[in-house]
Image (tube, rainbow, N blue to C red):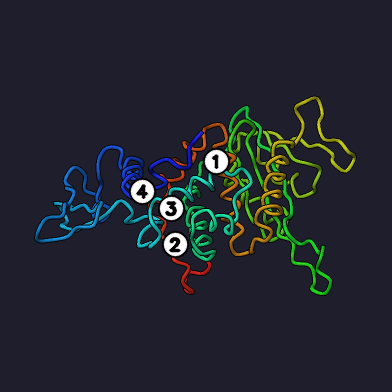
């Protein structure tokens, strides 16, 4: 367990020290030239004021802080609030809304929303390895989120968004926002993210037999006939469990997720699922390791980024 009143969530000095330890475990690295072991921390004197945490690289002769080159760069939000927001998002099983985050951090809703998306970007794995492998089972299924017409007396129901998920039993989860559920749209994802030596497990949907032939084996369960588990091995309960958690988060916590940003929410749930067997603090620290090289500005020209 982690005390949310810990020093790194309350003071800038403690927050900066914690982030430097996470990002630079072997000493400061210049984000401009990549130099190591040749940076010195600048200190204030009678002639010049120096902001805390400022370093100077002896190779490229530039200054930097631990936030340069990360999703935190040039943010006016105090670093200790960033670390607290990161911890809250990573420790909330069904997510935490931007309104709730705004109340807990003492910032505006707009700021909290922006912070949430930057942290989700840090949680995203840019180059994931294929899941599964020889003698391993990968469950694949699809679901739909949104689209409920309840309490919409006059407006038409919003469009349902299709989500495809694949999970290795006792392994990692990946979810993808797809335009439609067909063999043509699902196959490229399956062959790119699942090791061909895996045993594929799906329901009886007609979209899976063709791509299933490209793997070591393909088993199914017939949900339409109310068959959910056969001989303890044939089932898709793992991916169904992940979908259940996702829907509870979207329905109960976020209420509305836009089509443009759905993939980031999926990445958030993937990350927590894939690191579910460790402590909240360890999960939050792993997320902090992903802040590098992922600037996110949300300017109009980068709206789809």
The alpha-carbon separation of the residues under discs 1 and 4 comes to: 40 Å
Which circle, 1 or 3, is nearer the viewer? 3
Question: Residue beneath label 3, please?
Answer: 82
Which circle, 1 or 2, is nearer the viewer? 2
Mark 3 packing: few (<14 Cα in 10 Å), some, or many (20+)? many
Q: Is residue 8 left or right of residue 90?
A: left
Q: Could you say whether the residue bearing mark 2 is in a helix, strand or loop?
A: loop
x and y percentages locating residue 260 in the rendered image: 60, 64
Q: Is residue 57 left or right of residue 24?
A: left
Seen as rendered, the residue at the extreme top is 231
Which circle, 2 or 3, is nearer the viewer? 3
Q: Could you say whether the residue bearing mark 1 is in a helix, strand or loop?
A: loop
Q: Name the foreground residue: 175 vs 16.
A: 16
x and y percentages locating residue 189 in the rendered image: 61, 50
For residue 11, the mark is 4
Seen as rendered, the residue at the extreme left is 47
Q: Name the foreground residue: 56 vs 164.
A: 56
Label 4 close to label 3 by CB (< 8 Å)? no
Label 1 close to label 4 by CB (< 8 Å)? no
x and y percentages locating residue 209 in the rendered image: 75, 44
Disc nearer the start of the sequence (4/2): 4
């Amino acid at each position: 367990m982690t005390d949310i009143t810990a020093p790194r969530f309350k003071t800038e000095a403690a927050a900066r020290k914690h982030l430097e330890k996470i990002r630079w475990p072997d000493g400061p690295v210049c984000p401009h030239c990549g130099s190591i072991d040749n940076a010195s921390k600048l200190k204030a004197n009678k002639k010049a004021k120096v902001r805390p945490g400022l370093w100077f690289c002896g190779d490229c002769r530039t200054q930097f802080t631990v936030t340069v080159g990360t999703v935190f760069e040039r943010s006016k939000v105090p670093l200790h609030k960033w670390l607290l927001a990161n911890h809250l998002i990573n420790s909330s099983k069904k997510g935490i809304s931007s309104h709730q985050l705004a109340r807990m951090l003492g910032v505006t809703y707009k700021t909290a929303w922006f912070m949430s998306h930057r942290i989700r970007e840090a949680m995203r794995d840019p180059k994931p390895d294929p899941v599964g492998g020889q003698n391993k089972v990968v469950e694949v299924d699809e679901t739909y989120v949104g689209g409920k017409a309840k309490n919409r007396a006059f407006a038409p129901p919003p469009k349902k968004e299709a989500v495809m998920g694949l999970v290795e039993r006792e392994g990692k989860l990946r979810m993808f926002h797809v335009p439609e559920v067909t063999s043509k749209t699902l196959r490229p994802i399956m062959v790119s993210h699942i090791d061909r030596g895996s045993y594929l497990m799906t329901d009886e949907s007609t979209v899976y037999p063709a791509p299933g032939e490209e793997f070591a084996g393909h088993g199914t369960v017939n949900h339409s006939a109310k068959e959910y588990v056969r001989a303890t091995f044939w089932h898709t309960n793992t991916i169904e469990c992940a979908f259940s958690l996702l829907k509870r988060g979207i329905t109960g916590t976020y209420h509305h997720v836009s089509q443009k940003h759905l993939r980031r929410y999926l990445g958030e749930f993937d990350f927590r699922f894939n690191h579910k067997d460790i402590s909240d603090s360890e999960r939050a620290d792993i997320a902090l390791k992903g802040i590098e090289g992922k600037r996110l500005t949300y300017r109009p020209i980068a709206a789809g980024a």
